[in-house]
Amino acid sequence: MLNLSASEENYLKAIYHLQAGGGNVSTKALAESLQARPASITDMMKKLDAKKLLHYRPYYGFTLSPEGRKAALGIIRRHRLWEFFLAEKLGFAWEEVHPVAEELEHVRHKKLVDKLDAFLGFPRFDPHGDPIPDSKGRMDKAGTVPLSELPLQQPARVCRVAGQSSELLELLREKGIGIGTRVEVRRRFTYDGSLQVQVRPNRSETISAQLAQTIIIEL
Amino acid sequence: MLNLSASEENYLKAIYHLQAGGGNVSTKALAESLQARPASITDMMKKLDAKKLLHYRPYYGFTLSPEGRKAALGIIRRHRLWEFFLAEKLGFAWEEVHPVAEELEHVRHKKLVDKLDAFLGFPRFDPHGDPIPDSKGRMDKAGTVPLSELPLQQPARVCRVAGQSSELLELLREKGIGIGTRVEVRRRFTYDGSLQVQVRPNRSETISAQLAQTIIIEL
DNA sequence: CAGTTTTTTTAGATTCGCCTAAATATTTCA
DNA sequence: TGAAATATTTAGGCGAATCTAAAAAAACTG
C-alpha cells in the first residue's frame, strides 16, 4: 500500500472533487481549489504521475488513475466519518465540522477507520448530506436536484448542500435551512432568479439564485 | 498561542517525560528517546529556545520553561484522551492504542479536545493507568510503587504500567496482567530478584525483576 | 493568421526537519 | 594530569513542499 503524505492526499482529494465523475482537471483549477500557485501543482502532478496515482500530460491536464481514485475515496471516507462523529457524538454544529475533519482525515490507520465506522453504526451520509464511502469505496449517490429546479408548490426535503464555506453555512443557518429541512418554492422571480421559499411549516424566506443552486433537495 | 509543528510537539513531550518532575535533559538522552541523531536535537533545541519553550545551554542541557511545560501537558492531555477513546469507545485493546494516539494527538483544536473530554466523561486516567491532565493542565498523581517493592502476602491492585512497548504489553497480556488486576507476591527469589506472584484469585506467575519494576501498584 | 492574452512549465530559491562527517568540548581514568 | 573516550556542536547537504520570476506553449481575437 502506497504511503501518502498529507499534502499528496489533499491533492488527490481535490482532483477527485474537481473531476466530479470524470473528465480532465487543469492546473489552474486545482491551484485555485488548493489555494496554491500553479507551479506547485505542476511539481506535485509529476510526483503523483510517477506514483501512478494519476495520468498527467503536460499542458493538457490530469485524471486520477483507478488507484488514485481508490485513494481519494479512502480519504473522503475518513473525512466524512469524522464529520459524522464530530456532529453526532461530540455535539459540534454541522457547519463547524469540516475544518476539524480536514485534519483528522490524515490519520491513516485502517483499523481506526473501520472501528470508527462500526462505532458510528455504519452511517451512509455525513452531516452535510454527502454520502460516506464504505470500506470498499462504494457509496450511495448524492442527490443532484438543486432547489433552483424544484417546481412551484412541490414540497421537498433538503438532502445535501453543495459547499462548506463558512459564509455559505452562516447564510443557511440564518435562513433556518439544514439537512432534512422541508421546503417548498412559492414564487420564482425571473428578473434575478431569486425564489420565495416556504421553510418548514410557517416561515418564508427569499433565496438568491446562487444559493438555490447549492441547496440540493429530494422529493 | 504558539503554533507548533508535530515535530516540535514530539520534542516537547519527550523532554517532559525525560525530565519527570524536574532536572536537566541531555542531548544524548533525547536523541535516544526520539530515535534521532544528536545533531538533529541540537538544531531543534536552538529553535525551541528561541521560541522560549525551553532553556538551552550548549554542552549543558535543557529544561522546559513554564510555557513549554504547559504545551507538553496539552499534548499529553490529547494523547491520553484519545487513548481512552480508542479503548473505551472503539474497543481497541489497551496495548494497541498508543501508536494511534501518537498521530491523533497532533490535531490541535481546543474545542475538539474539550468536547472529546466531556464526551468521555472527563476521565482521570488513560488505559495504561496514566493520569490525564485537565484543560488547565492539572492532573492526579500517578502511583509510584512498583510491584518489586510490594511486601509478601500483601494484596494490591495494578494501577499503572510504566512503558508501552509492544514487547512489554505482549508479555503482560501473556501473564494475564492489566490495569486493575489484583496481585499478591508469594515468594521473592533473591538470586535474580524474580517474583512468584498470585494473579487474580487462582493463577500463579513468575515475574522477572525487570518486569516487576514496570508494574505499578496501589494497596 | 499573427499578435496578444492566458495558462502552464521551468529554473532557481526558501524553510523545515532531518542526516553525515568533522570539529570541539567535556568527562573519565590510568 | 594528560590521553582516551564520550558527548555535543558545527558545517554542509538532502528531500519535501512550497514560492517567485521568467520562459514557453496554447488559446483567443481582431
Image (cartoon, coloured by chain):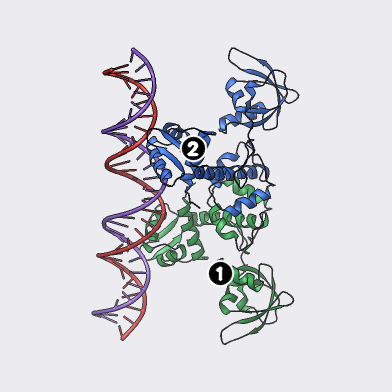
Chain colours: A green, B blue, C purple, D red
Left or right: residue C25 compared with residue B110 = left
Helix, strand or loop under label 2: helix
Examine the rendering and report whether any part of residue A53 can be seen. yes
At a point 60% along the width and 69% down the height, the residue shown is: A170
Image check: B70 left or right of A93?
left
The residue that disc 2 covers is: B15
What label does residue A115 carry, if any? none
Q: Chain of mark 1?
A: A
Q: Amino acid type of disc 1?
A: Glu
* Residue found at x 58% / y 29%: B168
Pick whichever, A168 or A5, lies toward us: A168
Q: Is residue B44 left or right of residue B10?
A: left
Badge 2 amino acid: Ile
Residue at image coords 49%, 32%: B23
Image vertical order of residue B16 relative to residue A153, above or below: above
- Report the residue marked by disc 1: A167
Q: Residue at x 66, y 45 (%)?
A: B90
Q: Say what secondary structure mark 1 lies in.
A: helix
Viewer can see residue A76: no
Q: Is A144 or C3 nearer to us in this picture?
A: C3
Image coordinates for residue B76, horizontal then vertical, percent: 57, 42
* Residue at the farthest bottom position: A191
Q: How many marks?
A: 2
User: Residue A171: horizontal and vertical position, in percent?
Assistant: 60, 72
Q: Residues within 10 Å of mark 1 (few under 14, many from 20)?
A: few
> Is label 1 or label 2 in front?
2
Q: Is residue B128 above or below residue A14?
A: above
Chain label for disc 2: B
Residue B111 placement (x, y as % from top left): 60, 54
Q: Quadrant of the C terminus of chain A?
A: bottom right
